[in-house]
Amino acid sequence: MQTTQVNLNDGYIKVCKTEEIPENSCKIFFLDDKEIVVFKNNGNFFAFDNNCPHQNSPVLSQGFIEDDYLVCPNHLFMFNLETGKMKTTGLKLRKHSVLLEDGSIFVKLNSDT
Ligand code: FES
């Protein structure tokens, strides 16, 4: 696990180098006392609170990716990586903005998504 390294003026925080997260895997970071998980799928990076909204369980980092959906390990509910929305109900992951620059991943925490 890593902690904040760089704060940029626009609120993005450097979390790691892109090569530190292999395809179809993830890494956890602590930003502003929140547990954030960053996944890589098809070369793209997605950042969420590590909590599954179904039972507010901090387990998403133990989930897996299937057909562009993040699957929660507890009850196998599926969440779209692009939108954070659950496939079958209105539940939604708290998604954060990701920026790639100079081979590094930057995350900006969003409070309303
Ligand atoms: S806690 Fe994630 S699907 Fe139930």
Image (spheres, grey):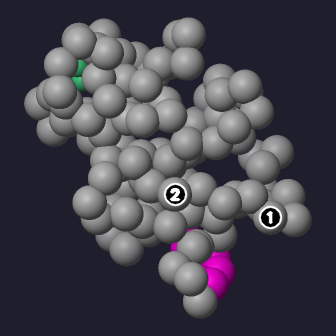
Who's the residue at 35% across and 43% down the image? 50
Secondary structure type for disc 1: strand
Three-letter amino acid code of the residue under disc 2? Ser
Task: For the N terminus, give its image quadrant.
Answer: bottom right
Who's the residue at 26% across and 35% down the image? 92
Q: Nearer the viewer, residue 54 or 58?
A: 54
Q: Which residues are magenta?
A: 3-8
Is residue 7 shown in magenta? yes
Q: Quadrant of the rendered structure where residue 27 is?
A: top right
Label 1 sits on residue: 101
Q: Quarter containing ligand 1?
A: top left
In-image side of 44 versus 47 (left or right)? right
Placement of 73 over or under 39, stated as above or below: above
Label 2 sits on residue: 97
Placement of 67 over or under 91, stated as above or below: above
Three-letter amino acid code of the residue under disc 1? Glu
